[in-house]
Image (tube, rainbow, N blue to C red):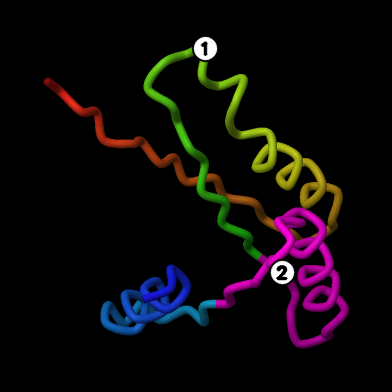
Amino acid sequence: MVRAEKLRKHWNENNIGIELQIIESPYRAVVQDIIKYVDEVESDPRWTSITVVIPEYVPNKLFQNFFHNQTGQLLKLMLLIGKNIYVTSIPYHPKVNKQ
């Protein structure tokens, strides 16, 4: 099962109560694809504000931060320029393999 399908299934099974929008980004142009989508939604007069939830990978070791989170930080910066856009970061801590 594809990740998006698993997420959609989990979302529906748990009756979250908020419409889930999954933006496909086949060429890994994540920031551009999300900004384009948010621009489209922002132009719709039905919406007075938009909330974007960004998962933020928190590596186990401090030096690993240099290799991660740049995309999330760039996306957050680009979204904060919008007038009625709220950005929420949700930290994701990977499991530590103890041997």
Q: In this view, does 76 lie above or below 40?
A: above
Q: Which residue is drawn at 34% across and 81% down?
A: 9
Q: Which residue is drawn at 65% across and 72% down?
A: 23
Q: Which amino acid does label 2 sit on?
A: Ser
CB-based contact (under 8 Å), mark 1 and mark 2: no
Q: Quadrant of residue 13?
A: bottom left
Foreground pick, 3 / 83: 3
Q: Quadrant of the C terminus?
A: top left
Residue 61 lies, in percent from the top left, at 41, 16
Residue 46 lies, in percent from the top left, at 76, 87
Q: Which residue is drawn at 58% across and 31% down?
A: 68
Q: In which quarter of the image is the N terminus?
A: bottom left
* Crowd band around label 2 with a 10 angstrom C-alpha radius: few (<14), some (14–19), many (20+): few
Q: Nearer the viewer, mark 1 or mark 2?
A: 1
**Circle 1 is placed at which residue position?**
63
Q: In this view, does 7 lie above or below 89?
A: below
Badge 1 marks a residue whose secondary structure is helix
Q: What residue type is labelled 1?
A: Phe
- Gap in Å between the C-alphas at discs 1 and 2? 36 Å
Q: Give the range drawn in magenta.
A: 21-50
**Circle 2 is placed at which residue position?**
49
99 relative position to 91: left or right: left
**In magenta stretch: residue 42:** yes
Q: Earlier in the sequence, mark 1 or mark 2?
A: 2
Q: In which quarter of the image is residue 28?
A: bottom right
Q: Residue at x 76, y 53 (%)?
A: 31
Q: Is residue 83 above or below residue 37?
A: above
Residue 12 lies, in percent from the top left, at 34, 84
Badge 2 marks a residue whose secondary structure is loop
- Residue 30 is labelled as none
* Crowd band around label 1 with a 10 angstrom C-alpha radius: few (<14), some (14–19), many (20+): few
